[in-house]
Image (spheres, rainbow, N blue to C red):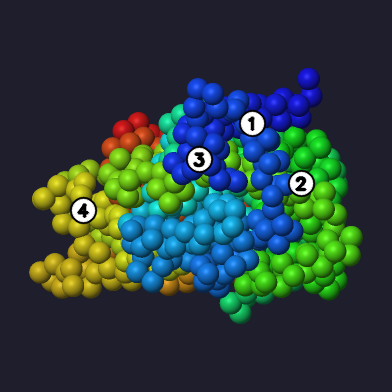
Amino acid sequence: MKRTHVSFLLLSILLLTACGRAASTPAPSPASPTQPAPASPAAAPVQSVDERVAALLTQMTLAEKIGQMTQAEKGSIAPRDVTRYFIGSVLSGGGGSPPSNTPEDWLAMVNGYQEAALATRLGIPLLYGVDAVHGHAAVVGATVFPHNVGLGAADDPQLMRRIGQATAAEMAATGIRWNFAPVVAVPQDIRWGRTYEAFGEDPALVSRLAAPYIEGLQNGAADQPFADPATVAASAKHFVADGGTAFGSANTANMGVQYLLDQGDAPIDEATLRALHLPPYQAAVDAGAATVMASFSSVNGVKMHANRDLLTGVLRDELGFSGFVVSDWQGIDQIPGDYYSDVVTAINAGIDMVMTPYDYKRFIDTLIQAVERGDVTQERIDEAVGRVLRVKFALGLFDGDPMQPGAPLEVVGSSEHRDLAREAVRQSLVLLKNEGNTLPLIEDTPLIYVGGEAADDIGIQIGGWSTQWQGEAGDITEGTTILDGIRQVSKPGSNVVHDAAGRFDGFTDAQGRQLLADVGVAVAAERPYAEGVGDSADLALPPADLAMVQRMRDSSRRLVVVVLAGRPVDITDLLPLADAVVVAWLPGSEGAGVADGLFGHSPFTGTLPYTWPRSADQLPFNFANLPAEGSAAPLFPAGFGLTSEP
Ligand code: GLC
C-alpha cells in the first residue's frame, strides 16, 4: 500500500479515535452547531471528524470560512476584530509577548483572543501559534533548550521527544496549541542566518531528530496525537529547500541588513531536491505533523508560496500530507504580481491559511472577491477550511473548554524541564581540541580567569527567537550562565575571576608582575540574530572577542576556549592559541551545562552537525567532492568530535 494511503489512513484513524473519544464525552454546553449533542444511551452514533467537519462547513458563510483561513498577528488585531471577522488564528511573531511578560499574562492574552473567537455565531475556537523553536523562549521564565544546531550535535532522538513534550507542556500552560516548529531545513551553506534553527547538513540526521520532536510536541505523554491536553500542533518548516538557497540570491532586507541567502533562490535539480530537502518532510508527515509552513524562498526561480507542483503535487499527492499548509509572514506578498493575483495564486497553489499579520481585512476582502469572480472555487475554500477545522477538532478544541490551559502554569520553567535542558546542553558540547589533557578541569584549581562578555550573559547564550525576535544580550530571563556553572562546580579553594574583556591587570605578584591563571576559560560568541539578519559573508567572530582570547592566552598557563555560535565560525586564527576548544553552540537558559562538560561531570559525546570550514572562502562546499586533506579540506568534517570519559 502506498505510503500516502498509509499515512492518510493512520492520521484518519488517529483523528477518528481522538475525536471519537471526544465526541463521546458529554459536551459541557447544550448542543450547539460546534458542540456534539450530550452523550446519552439513546444518543446518535459518535460522529467522525470528517462528519463533524462536513456538518460545520454546511453551516458556515463564505466570510466565516475565509476567516478560518486568516491568521493575524496579536499586535495588529484587537479581540473584537477576531469576532467581527471570524478570525481562525492569531500568532505572536518573534518575541510577541504581552506588556508584562509572565506566563500568567501570556495565558490571559491568549484567552482574550480565544474568548473573542468563541463569541462568534458558530463559536469556532481559535488556534494560537508561536515560534517555540527552542522551548517557549519568548516567555520570561520559560525553559530555553539549546537551539537545533546543538541538538543536532547531541543527535539523540529520545532526547528530542522529551524536549518536544516539555516544550508543548509549557506552551499549553499558556493556552497556546500550535508551534511553528521544527525547522526541517537541510542547510547546505552555513553562511545562512537560520543555520542554527536546523539540525544539520545531513537529511538523515534532520529526519531522525525532527520526527521524535514532532511526536513529543503532538503526543505528549500519550501514544496518540493530542490525547494528552499538554500537546500542540507541530509545523514542519519551511517547505521546501529553504536551506538550499544560493549565496547572493536573496533580495530581502530587514532592520537595515541586506539578506544574502535567506528567502533567496535554490537553483537545484530534482535529484538534489529529492535527495536532500524532501526526506525530512516525509519523516515529518510520517510522524503526523499537523501543519506545514511554506518557505519564503524559491526553487529554480518559483516562489514556494506559488508553487502548486511542490505544495500540492509533491507534499500532498506524493508525501501524503493531510494537515494544513500555512504561509509564512506576509509570504504571499512576495509572489510576483499584484495583491489580488498573489492571493489567487497562493490559495490555488495549496496555501490553506495565510499569515497576514497586519492586512487581515484586505486579505479577507480580496479572497471573497476572488471566490465571487470564480478565480478561487468554493471547493478549494471548503478544502482549505476543512483541513484547518480537522486539526482544530483533532486538538480537542471543540470538545471541552478551549480556555482551560492544557497544563498548569507551574510547568513553565520547572526544575524538571531545566534539568532536561541542562542534560541537552551537556550532550550538545563538541570537543574540537584538548592538548595536554587540559580538560577536564579540576574543581579546586587555585586561580581560574574567565573571559568574555558571553561568559556571563544569558541573552547571548540563548541567541535568536527569545524574548525578542532577534534575541538580545543581557539578563533577559531566568537560568544560569557559563560563569554561574563554573562557580557552582568549582570548590571554595578555587578563585574564579571574570572579566568581559579578559583583563586581569589587578592580579599581580609581589613584584607587580601579572599573575598567571592556572586555567583561563575564554568564551567567544556570535551575538544574537535571527533569519536573514544573521546571513554572514565571513563567519567572523567579534574582533573584541578575538582580542580577549589573545589577552587570556597571555595570562593563563592553560587556555580553554568555549565557542558560542549558531554555526561553524572562523576559528582558524583562534585554534592555535587554545589548549582546548569546546563548541557549545547556543545552549539556551541552562548555561551551567557547559561547566558540567568542562569539569568532566559529563563526557564529551557531541559531534559536528555541519562541516567546519577553514574560512568562508571555502563556501559553498562541494560535498560530493570534499577533499579530506590539505588546504582545500575543511577544518573539521561533519561528524567530528573528540570524546572524553568523565
Ligand atoms: C518568520 C519566520 C517563520 C516564523 C514566522 C512567524 O518570518 O520565517 O519561521 O514561524 O515568521 O514568526
Q: How many marks?
A: 4
Of labels 2 and 1, earlier in sequence is 1
Circle 3: residue type: Asp
| Label disc, if present, on residue 383 of the rendered structure | 2
Q: Write the residue at 22% across / 43% down.
A: 442
Q: CA distance from mark 1 to mark 3?
A: 13 Å
With 567 as the anchor, is 434 left or right in this view?
left
> At numbered mark 3, what does the secondary structure look like: helix, strand or loop?
loop
Task: Sort mark 3 into few (<14), some (14-19) or many (20+) by Cα contacts within 10 Å.
Answer: many
Q: Position of residue 202 (x, y in %)?
A: 65, 40
Task: Sort mark 2 into few (<14), some (14-19) or many (20+) by Cα contacts within 10 Å.
Answer: some
Q: CA distance from mark 2 to mark 4?
A: 58 Å
The answer to the question of whether label 2 and label 4 lie on touching residues, with beta carbons closer than 8 A, is: no
Q: Quadrant of residue 343?
A: bottom right
Query: In front of the other: label 2 or label 4?
Result: 2
| Label disc, if present, on residue 399 of the rendered structure | 3
Circle 4: residue type: Arg
Q: Position of residue 292 (x, y in %)?
A: 66, 47
Q: Write the residue at 59% across / 57% down.
A: 121
Q: CA distance from mark 4 to mark 1?
A: 58 Å
Q: Position of residue 91 (x, y in %)?
A: 54, 61
Residue 357 visible in the shown view = yes
Query: What is the residue that sits farthest to the right in this orientation?
Result: 374
Residue that numbered label 1 is attached to: 48
Q: Is residue 1 above or below residue 546?
A: above
With 133 as the anchor, is 62 left or right in this view?
right
Residue that numbered label 4 is attached to: 487
> At numbered mark 2, what does the secondary structure look like: helix, strand or loop?
helix
Q: Position of residue 524 (x, y in %)?
A: 42, 61
